[in-house]
Image (cartoon, rainbow, N blue to C red):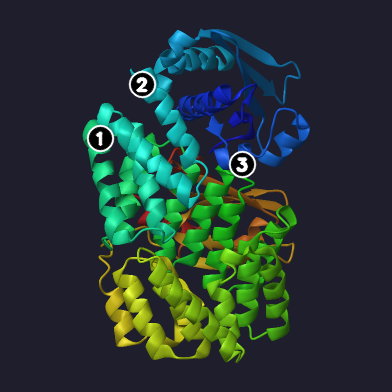
Amino acid sequence: MSTLNNRLAILPFQTNSETSNSLGQAVYETIFSVITSSPSYEVISKDSSSQYLATHDLGYIFKSLHCSIVLTGYLSERENEFELILTLYSKKNKKAREQKSIIDKKDILHLGDICLNMVHQVLGLTNSKNVQEVPKLQNPQLYRKFILANYHFNRWTKNNIVEAVQLYKEVITKEPQFVPAYLKLAKSYMYQAGRGYEKPMTVYPLAMRAIETALKINPNSGEAIIDQNLINFFFHLDWRYIYTSIEKGLENYVDASEAYQQLSFFWYGLREYDAALDALYSALEYDPISTGILNMIGDVQLSARRYDASEKTFKSILKMVPNDTSSLENLLYIAALRNSKQRCFYYLNKLKKLLPEEEKYVPRMAYAYGKFGMVKEAHDYLDYYNELEKKNPNRVIHNFKAQVYSGLGNWDKAMSLIEKGWEARTGLLFILTDPQWEPIRKWKRYQALVGQIQFPSKVENVHYITLQTDLKETLRINLNSLLFAKAEDNYTRLFFYQNFRIEQKLIRATLQKVTIQLPPTQFIRIHKSTVLNTEQRFSISGNSKTRIVRLIQYDYELTVSRSLSNELLKLLYTKAE
């Protein structure tokens, strides 16, 4: 369990030229990888930390990112050299710590080693085993090409990704042992498939080939292990190993936030919405202001038909990003699902004003038009999608058209298009979870699609209940992952093992109030301050004066009350090992 004291945010580096700007991004990525691989720190995701600069109020940054350490830097270009300055700010110590290094332009290939040494000094990391070796390119031209490819990759537009793919392929051709290029290339292909820019049947095999090559070079790459099984998940419909691969991948993966997001896909596809949300909340710990993760949370809540919660989530995003088109699209969709025409078109008209001409044909708008009997407008969308398919044969938009027919109530045509979308491997989670497909979910044709998935034989058993607190709020918890609960005055601290780690949640409710909401055959109050889940492996040692429960799989010892009734004591010994 992390604490605030070891949570560190790495802010974007400031630069003074176009060349130092691209190099600054490379330095940032290198330092992020170096520090994240150290067990000493829990690093905030780049998506959240990149929203701030060191020129912003530090107090606000510490509070917003829930961290106690901020690291940033400045890279300036001179005639024949670069100057790199790393600056560390601590919430405890007001005085900043600084490290400087002059890098000759001829030594640019040693940038990774220089960063490594500087990070060791500024953070006091003396054990080299704590950090991973930074992959190196030996050719200066290739190094610059890789940096340029990363620049395009991080822009996430259709044309930028095309540029990135070409550059990564050029790097790999010249340096076939350079794993980071294979991983970025695979992600670029997966992005093209996910956005419908290229046919998944074409680019997913290319992505898998890149990942398999990366694993041959580095079998322990956590990122490659997870991405390989993610492709099996979405493309081959093989879900047997994605859960265990994420656990293994997390051991050697620098971006925990992304790994937990991928874990949420697994639970989401199984329609285990509470478990998916728990995984996303774990991701949010590493990426606390990510609107992307909040959007995913809102999507899961929507699919679970928790419309009030989903609406609240999307409105919270709009407070941060007032013109967020994705949130407006989801809000109009929720209103349509609730048959609230006035509310739906309030959001629809607001969204139309924000969208550029080439993006105005949003499928959920078409669904709304069909749902509320505006047949001509719905068919205008169908005409547009048909024309788009003719102009862009590589685009896969079957699911777009399916939503129009769903709104119109033409379920046979909607089902036929879903089948085509499924065969093309687009919108898998959308087809499995979206509420609009409820009328056809029991159809044999729909069930035949689901039957193609290879489900895992055994995964973590989940059993969620709703827990009432003293604040008139509710909390969904997985009983099977709850290890024990401890009283803290008028609060209760819950201890879980979920998402492959120990997690704690402090809630405003007395232990007595919590206890009466738990199944009495599973949870025993072994002490006035402790409730134990007896359906886990545990042992008991000691005598009538001092008895200790030890959780065999976890590093916890719990005291058993001397006043525990003989009946409960007998039950406890019966369940102990």
**Residue that appears at 40% across and 23% down:** 143
- Of callouts 2 and 1, the N-terminal one: 2
Q: Amino acid at mark 1?
A: Pro
Distance from Cα at disc 3 to Cα at disc 2? 27 Å
Q: Is residue 461 left or right of residue 545?
A: left
Residue wearing tag 1: 219
**Residue that appears at 54% across and 9% down:** 81
Circle nearer the viewer, 2 or 1? 2
Frontmost residue, 500 versus 530? 500
**Residue that appears at 31% across and 68% down:** 424
**Residue that appears at 71% across and 34% down:** 62
Distance from Cα at disc 2 to Cα at disc 1? 18 Å
Residue wearing tag 2: 136
Q: Are marks 1 and 3 in contact (CB under 8 Å)?
A: no
- Of callouts 1 and 3, the N-terminal one: 3
- Return the mark for residue 48: 3
Could you say where residue 490 lies in the image, as x and y percent from the top left?
Answer: 73, 53
Mark 1, secondary structure of its residue: loop
Q: Is residue 127 left or right of residue 74?
A: left
Which quarter of the figure has residue 327?
Answer: bottom right
Q: Amino acid at mark 3?
A: Ser
Q: Residues within 10 Å of mark 2 (few under 14, many from 20)?
A: some
